Structure formats: C-alpha cells, structure tokens
C-alpha cells in the first residue's frame, strides 16, 4: 500500500530511488570515478601518441612515462561496481603490450 500523491504534486517527487546498488561489490556503495578518470587520461595520452604529427624527442619520452604512470594507477585500482569491473576488463583488453 502506498499513499496517493497530493493533488497538484509532480509524480517524480514520489519516485525517488533510495535503494542501494545491488551490483556493488562487497556491499560498498562507492563509485569508481577515480578509475574512470585514470582510464580517460591514459586514453587521452595514447591518442596524442597515435595522432598524426607524432611528438618527437623529449616530448614523446615524457608522454610515454606519463601514460605508463596512468596505466599503473588503473592496474592498482580495485573496482567496486560492476561498471568499474567491466571498464577495467575492457581497458586490459585494449592494451597492446605483450608483457601486460
């Protein structure tokens, strides 16, 4: 049984979701924002390295070091949601490195 909405009220006021995320791993209700940010930054750097007009010399060395640092952050992160797990698996499948 649920009470009827007040006259003149908007139906969305009564449809708020307050249930916990059933897919959160280990009962944690965090999100994986840090993981998604690290993946996005790694992909941004990889796009720079693979774009036409490839950087040269010290600039390319710096970008490779930075991309490796972001990749390590993603590797160390432990996702807490199903979405985070899938993003981490997708990230790993796209790495073109025989030692990864």
Image (spheres, grey):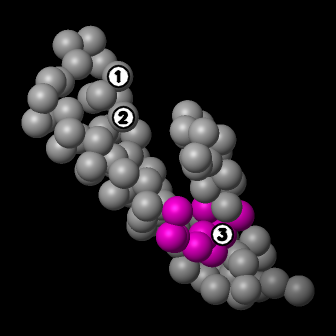
Residue at 33% across / 38% down in the picture? 44
Q: Secondary structure at mark 3?
A: loop
Question: Where residue 26 appears, x then y in whole percent?
Answer: 73, 86
Residue drawn at x 43%, y 61% is 72
Q: Is 74 covered by the magenta stretch?
A: no
Q: Position of residue 34 (x, y in %)?
A: 42, 67
Q: Residues within 10 Å of mark 2 (few under 14, many from 20)?
A: some
Mark 3 neighbour class, 10 Å CA radius: few under 14, some 14 to 19, many 20 or more: many
Outermost residue, right side: 1
Q: Are marks 2 and 3 in contact (CB under 8 Å)?
A: no
Q: Secondary structure at mark 2?
A: helix
Residue of label 2: 46
| Marks 2/3: CA–CA distance | 26 Å
Chain part drawn in magenta: 75-84
Q: Is 65 on the left-hand or right-hand side of 86?
A: left
Q: Which residue is mark 3?
A: 81
> Which numbered disc, 1 or 3, marks the residue closer to the eye?
1
The vertical placement of 74 against 31, above or below, is above
State the residue lying farthest toward the top. Answer: 52
Label 1 to label 3: alpha-carbon separation: 31 Å
Residue 7 image offset from top left, x and y in percent: 61, 72
Mark 1, residues whose alpha carbon is within 10 Å: few (<14), some, or many (≥20)?
few
The answer to whether the residues at label 1 and label 2 have Cβ atoms under 8 Å apart is: yes
Location of residue 34 with respect to 49 vertically, above or below: below
Find disc 1 in the rendering and name its residue: 50
> Position of 32 compared to 70: left or right?
right
Disc 2 versus disc 3: nearer the observer: 2
Tally the marks. 3
Rendered image quadrant of residue 83 = bottom right
- Name the element at disc 1: helix
Residue 23, by quadrant, is bottom right
């Amino acid at each position: 049984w649920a009470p009827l909405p007040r006259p003149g009220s908007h139906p969305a006021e009564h449809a708020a979701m307050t249930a916990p995320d059933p897919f959160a791993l280990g009962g944690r209700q965090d999100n994986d924002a840090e993981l998604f940010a690290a993946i996005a930054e790694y992909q941004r750097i990889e796009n720079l390295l693979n774009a036409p007009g490839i950087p040269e010399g010290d600039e390319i060395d710096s970008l490779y070091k930075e991309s490796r640092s972001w990749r390590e952050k993603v590797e160390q992160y432990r996702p807490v949601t199903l979405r985070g797990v899938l993003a981490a698996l997708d990230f790993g499948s796209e790495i073109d490195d025989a030692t990864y």
